[in-house]
Image (tube, helix red, strand yellow):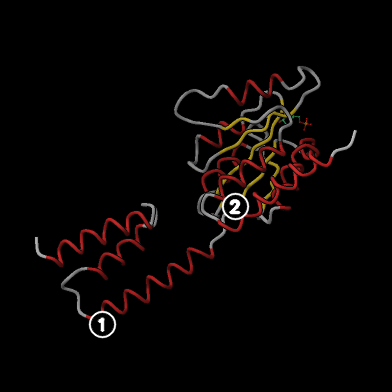
């Protein structure tokens, strides 16, 4: 293989790493730009397009959707809303029930990815199937929050959400663990958002300081 051929192969490898295998179109434009036999005009055009796409990708911020089976879940689920909004994450809030509004649930789950939702938090109590069913209809990560119930103290909700059969995962939080659900969702988004990652670090620092400053 000639020098330019080797250079091209090396550049492809580097691009694959930079684009993390996700941005197929961006990758293909970069590959065309780096091909040894491409004329200078096409190369410049591709470079402009790469720059434009890079800026667009950088500016896309993923949202978190918080869904709950009933308005009676809002008191607990607002802990997730508050923590996420405090970290500057855009939140979409909806009341969606697997048994009372099944069509709405399907519509929501199937369009979540194209709506720019990066994580779904689903809170429900009793026979709490909304998290599992939504997870079955999208590959957007789903975090389940079992809501405490009067009849069984939330054990019913917990077991309904946590015991997902293999193949469709739901990350289950503690009973009423909505705050951790919000933090967990933020940590997922922070993997590709350096500013959010810094805000999470700051949140942790302040939390630690509160414990250190505690006087009893
Ligand atoms: C579930 O039933 C909801 O998630 C809620 O936790 C529980 C009770 O709902 P309501 O009867 O209070 O509307 O679907």
Residue 113 percent coordinates (x, y): 51, 50
Indicate the quadrant where residue 185 lies: top right
**Picture residue at 50% right of the left edge, 64% below the top:** 58
Q: Residues within 10 Å of mark 1 (few under 14, many from 20)?
A: few
- Residue under pointer 2: 197
Residue 150 percent coordinates (x, y): 81, 21
Q: Mark 2 falls on what kind of element?
A: helix
Residue 157 percent coordinates (x, y): 68, 24
Question: Marks 2 and 1, Cα distance to the nearest angstrom?
Answer: 39 Å
Indicate the quadrant where residue 26 lies: bottom left
Q: Mark 1 falls on what kind of element?
A: helix
Q: Which of labels 2 and 1 is toward the front? A: 2
Q: Earlier in the sequence, mark 2 or mark 1?
A: 1
Q: Quadrant of the N terminus?
A: bottom left
Indicate the quadrant where residue 14 lies: bottom left
Q: Quadrant of the C terminus?
A: top right
- Residue under pointer 1: 41
The extreme top residue here reads 152
Residue 55 located left or right of residue 126? left
């Amino acid at each position: 293989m000639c020098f330019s051929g080797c250079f091209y192969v090396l550049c492809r490898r580097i691009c694959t790493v930079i684009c993390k295998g996700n941005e197929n179109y961006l990758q293909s434009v970069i590959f065309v730009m780096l091909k040894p036999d491409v004329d200078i005009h096409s190369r410049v055009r591709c470079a402009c397009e790469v720059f434009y796409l890079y800026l667009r990708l950088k500016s896309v911020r993923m949202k978190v959707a918080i869904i709950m089976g009933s308005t009676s879940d809002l008191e607990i689920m607002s802990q997730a809303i508050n923590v996420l909004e405090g970290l500057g994450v855009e939140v979409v809030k909806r009341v969606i029930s697997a048994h009372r509004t099944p069509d709405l649930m399907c519509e929501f789950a199937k369009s979540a990815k194209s709506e720019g939702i990066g994580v779904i938090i689903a809170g429900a109590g009793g026979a709490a199937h909304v998290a599992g069913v939504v997870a079955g209809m999208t590959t957007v990560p789903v975090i389940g929050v079992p809501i405490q119930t009067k009849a069984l103290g939330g054990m019913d909700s917990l077991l309904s959400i946590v015991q997902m059969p293999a193949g469709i995962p739901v990350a289950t939080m503690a009973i009423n663990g909505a705050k951790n659900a919000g933090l967990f969702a933020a940590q997922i988004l922070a993997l590709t958002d350096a500013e959010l990652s810094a805000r999470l670090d700051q949140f942790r620092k302040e939390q630690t300081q509160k414990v250190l400053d505690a006087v009893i």
